[in-house]
Amino acid sequence: MKKKNWYRSFSLVDDKYIEESNPNNVTAKKNNSRLLTILVAACASLAIIAGNLWLFLPFRTTPPDVSKYKNSEYYEVIQNLNVATFTPPRYKNNAQKLWGILKTNLSFGCAKGGDVDLMPPAMNEAANKVDSYQEITDNQVAGIIEADRIKRSDTHIYYLDEDVLRVYAINKENTVEVGNYTLYAGSNNYYLNQWEFYLSSDCKTVTVITQYYEKKNINSNRFVSLVSLDVSDPTNIVKKDEFKITGDYMSSRTANGSILLLTEFVINKNGLDFDDESTFIPQIDEGEGLYSLPASSILFPEDLNDPRYTIAMKLDESTLDLVGTAAYLSYSEEVYVSENHLFLTHVFAEKTENDDGTITRNAMTEISCLSYGEEQFEIKGKATVRGYVKDQWSMDEYEGVLRVFTTTNATTLTTHSYSNANVSVSVLQTATGRCNASLYCIDLNSFEIIASVIDFAPPYEEIQSVRFDGEIAYACTSIERSDPVFFFDLSDLSNITYKDTGTIEGFSTSLINLGNGYLLGIGVGASWNSFKVEVYEEVETGVRSVCSYELKNAEYSTEYKSYYIDRQNQLIGVGVSDYRADDYERYLLLHFDGYELVELINTKLNGTPEYKRGVYIDGYMYMFGVNDFKVEKVFD
């Protein structure tokens, strides 16, 4: 056996030597080796070429061509959005990009300062009464009703407890819930806690406004939905109609039988597809499926800097039929509605290169005025002011003039003139500090600025709250926790005068005319985690603080509609989180007796402060929270 294996091994060795001694086999091996070397070299060359192309091929620096959409009714929209959504590359090519990343890593990830953005909720004894509407919400403009979480008639109180409309029969201590309706019961959608509603003047219809997005995928559409409910029989509430539009809820009003609905539609740059209108055009559903907003209703500012729409819609309150639409591209969410006009704001940065090579950036606001009295919105004109508008309360129309308070903002202290042709250089002056406050008065016939008070606050202060009252205006500015309240006399626009309180601890996020010559401030006290209510009165030398009420270690709602303001009885109701108490979710009722703010009620009430509501009726305070309700007797 061993011998056989030995012979076999010897035979294999012989075969090996024979094969190697064959000259043809040696040549073939050399050729194969040479071919392999050539292939490896070619692949390496191709890899080098491909690598160089990847490294040094320049990035696109201009928006892509969209001419293939020239026959679309939205071609102008596409052209503008194509420019507005295109972001020029930071680096010229991948090689420069890699080097930039390498340098960042070598510097231990220390980030360098970039360009700063400027911008920073059983029938009773009254059953035989004629049921008529009674307003609770302290609306900014008389007769222009704002949606809220609470409304009432003579006989019933309606409260929107998240997605449940609850109806209570008013009967003092015996008040009970007599009916309710759960919206979207069993729905898989996500709802975003933006619940408001209207009660019609005949008290037979409730229109609920809510915000949700479909539970399909991460890119699912967001919707604003209006749901009309028949509440003529509170024990049997029935759904009537529904209206939907893609986007986010901003605000709304009712006037003369119409609902003015204001929404925002933000274009997702990553999901933008000009072949799919739904990615860049708001979609409307009136009950028969989604359709795109007409191109004819879309308007553009001169400086398109933000891929978002503000959409103003007018709907019939009884049917939710869409009557008129106007969509503004690149407009922000600060909207003011007067008796006849709707004002939209567009904030942009005006940049000027200084002699020393620095850039001065100023926040500017373009205000567009639309008339909503007819079926379609009509553009009346626009004006530009320096600074940005904090909220709707910072704007007011009075006798043909729009008065506007702004926080002015400049990133340098360098003085320069303005090149904006819409505003006179004499009116728009450079800020004396990085922040300040200014007042502008705009004629609504010519849309020219006819009066102004520039930088009236101490340097670096910002507008915190504003309240107009006819020919009088109040403005609170602050830096950190000091609170000057300014009183403006606007009776003669050629000679505007103002005076202030000086420094008071804290600041007011809401200023409220309490009547009888008094002004109410709701805001922050001496520390950031405090809540303060303060009463002021006008005196010859300024605005004097009369009294205040303060809670330490407490939070409050900055949503103005969450406050209950009763000027006739000098009552202030507000929900707070008082962390000094075991049951820290509370509702307060304060009474100003002409000398002090007296605490009449301090009771436990579930829900965060912005969701709580209250109303005083015939000696009793009715208070509503999240799945919670209380009645307390206040006066005999």
Image (cartoon, helix red, strand yellow):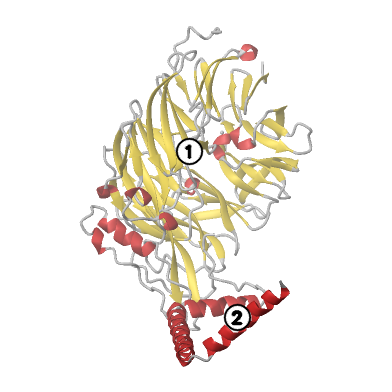
The Cα atoms of the two marked residues, 1 and 2, are separated by 85 Å
Looking at the rendered structure, which numbered label has been put on residue 12?
2
Q: How many marks?
A: 2
The x, y position of residue 428, in whole percent, is 43, 66
The quadrant the C terminus occupies is top right
Q: Is residue 258 visible?
A: yes
Foreground label between 1 and 2: 2
Looking at the rendered structure, which numbered label has been put on residue 24?
none
Q: Is residue 2 left or right of residue 56?
A: right
Local secondary structure at mark 1: strand
Q: Amino acid at mark 1?
A: Gln
Tag 2: Cα neighbours inside 10 Å, few (<14), some, or many (≥20)?
Answer: few
Q: Is residue 338 visible?
A: no
Q: Amino acid at mark 2?
A: Leu
- Location of residue 512 by image quarter: top right
Q: Nearer the viewer, residue 141 or 162?
A: 162
Q: Is residue 392 left or right of residue 112?
A: left
The x, y position of residue 86, in whole percent, is 39, 65
The x, y position of residue 198, in whole percent, is 45, 28
Q: Nearer the viewer, residue 612 or 9?
A: 9
Q: Are marks 1 and 2 in contact (CB under 8 Å)?
A: no
Tag 1: Cα neighbours inside 10 Å, few (<14), some, or many (≥20)?
Answer: many
Name above or below for residue 432 compared with residue 484: below
- Judging by the rendered image, the residue that carries numbered circle 1 is 211
The quadrant the N terminus occupies is bottom right
User: Which circle's residue, 1 or 2, is located before the other in the chain?
Assistant: 2
Q: Nearer the viewer, residue 573 or 544?
A: 573
Residue at horizontal 64 percent and vertical 36 percent from the top: 609
The x, y position of residue 283, in whole percent, is 35, 43
Name above or below for residue 391 compared with residue 634: below
